[in-house]
Amino acid sequence: MNTPKHLLERNKKWATKVRQQDPDFFINLSKQQKPKCLWISCSDSRVSVNQITDAQPGEFFVHRNIANLVSSSDLSCISTIQFAVEVLKVKHIIVCGHYGCGGIEASMKDKTVHGFIDDWLLPLNDIYRENKNTIELLSGIEKLDLLCELNVLAQVRNVYNTKSIQNARKQGIEIDIHGWIYDIRNGTLKDLQCMKEVIGGVINDHTNKINQLS
């Protein structure tokens, strides 16, 4: 079996560098984890939370899956949210999608050739069908960009509706949920600013503008 030894070597150099800068860094890090944010994003190898936010180890509790979906049937995701809310006491949950998502692009096609992935992407198919008339008014990459944004909005709503969040609200615990999207083409994050509208049960400005196109 071939081992990617270069990764182990890079790890040693990184750990040595960190210890040189702060001899107690790993000692303090190993004692506890107190992240303020839960980060839910796509498994895409180009979307690394620590790198794109310039964060240090310990700043984020992380859950990743194809197309950053939040489903009540996904025990891994729901358990992660519960642990983050009830045990880690996070103050923020960030659902971060990204433009150019392969999973979302696949959901726009009628072909079913991906096996289990097709089942996983079914919620995306629904989002696409519900907004197909609006999406098809756009051209080229704009279609995919819009669906990526609509997916983030849908997953923010799903997070908000989880039992963990609803129980926290009943107890008066405030947890801010954010919908962000990462642009791989220029390395920047965009806040879709959707949470207030999700709580209020009204259509947010972003979606309202989209609906005006139809």
Image (cartoon, grey):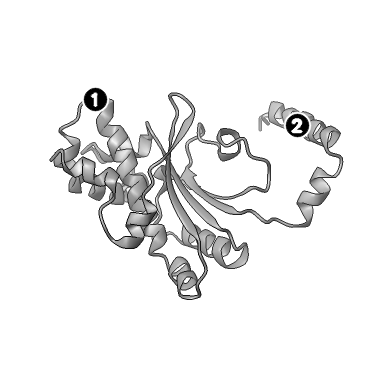
The residue closer to the viewer here, 115 or 73, is: 73
Q: Is residue 109 above or below residue 90?
A: above
Q: Is residue 120 above or below residue 44?
A: below
| C-alpha separation, residue under disc 2 versus residue under disc 1 | 41 Å
Q: In the figure, is residue 66 to the left or right of 39? A: left
Q: Position of residue 50 (x, y in %)?
A: 60, 38
Q: In the figure, is residue 210 to the left or right of 190? A: left
Q: Quadrant of residue 104?
A: top left
Mark 1: amino acid: Gly
Q: In the figure, is residue 171 to the left or right of 126? A: right
Taking the spot 23% from the left edge, 37% from the top edge, the residue there is 111
Taking the spot 29% from the left edge, 61% from the top edge, the residue there is 201
The residue closer to the viewer here, 112 or 176, is: 176
The residue carrying pointer 1 sits among few (fewer than 14), some (14 to 19) or many (20 or more) residues within 10 Å by Cα, namely few
Contact? badges 2 and 1 (CB < 8 Å):
no
Taking the spot 16% from the left edge, 34% from the top edge, the residue there is 136
Q: Position of residue 38 (x, y in %)?
A: 54, 53
| Tag shown at residue 140 | 1
| Tag shown at residue 14 | 2
Taking the spot 43% from the left edge, 24% from the top edge, the residue there is 185
Q: Is residue 181 visible?
A: yes
The kind of secondary structure element at disc 2 is helix
